[in-house]
Image (tube, rainbow, N blue to C red):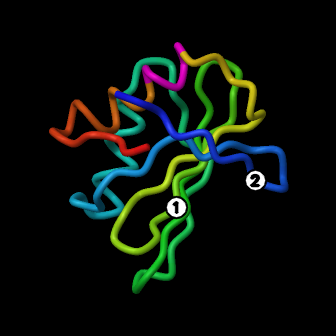
Amino acid sequence: MELMDIKAHDGSRQFLAIPQALDWDRMRDHIAGLPGATVSDFLTDHVTEVWIDFSYRAHTFTVNNQFGEYWFFVSPADCPEEILRTVAHHCGLDMGRRGKA
């Protein structure tokens, strides 16, 4: 899986986009199922948008839904590729989806 490398002004990096095939609660619970991951915040308007924050291996991750996709960000942007691939595999491939570059 090729990871995205879109740097944001806040110093984070968008590294993955997958179809929003799961509802917000199920995505949050799926992320929490990644060994070592801790969901720290979950914010939604219960209509159109969700933000899921979690930590994994000393890095901070944010998931937001946009345009029918879940977008994954990491901070700091220089997070090792191995960590990003683990998260991408758990959240993308394990659910039968692929990331897109």
Q: Nearer the viewer, residue 21 or 7?
A: 7
Instruction: Classify 30 as above or below 28.
Output: above
Q: Amino acid at mark 1?
A: Asn
Q: For the residue labelled by badge 1, is the local secondary structure a helix, a strand or a loop?
A: strand
Q: Residue 56 occupies which quadrant of the picture?
A: top right
Q: Quadrant of the N terminus?
A: top left
Where is residue 101 drawn, in percent x and y? Answer: 44, 43
Q: Is residue 85 magenta?
A: yes
Where is residue 95 drawn, in percent x and y? Answer: 20, 39
Specify the segment rendered in magenta: 82-86
The residues tagged by marks 2 and 1 sit, at their Cα atoms, a distance apart of: 14 Å
Q: Nearer the viewer, residue 58 or 29?
A: 58
Where is residue 87 drawn, in percent x and y? Answer: 44, 28
Q: Is residue 61 magenta?
A: no
Q: Residue 38 occupies which quadrant of the picture?
A: top right
The tally of labels here is 2
**Seen in the image, is 89 located left or right of residue 62?**
left
Q: For the residue labelled by badge 2, is the local secondary structure a helix, a strand or a loop?
A: loop
Q: Which mark is residue 35?
A: none
**Seen in the image, is 34 located left or right of residue 36?**
left
Residue of label 2: 8
Considering every residue shown, the one lying at the far bottom of the view is 47
Q: Amino acid at mark 2?
A: Ala
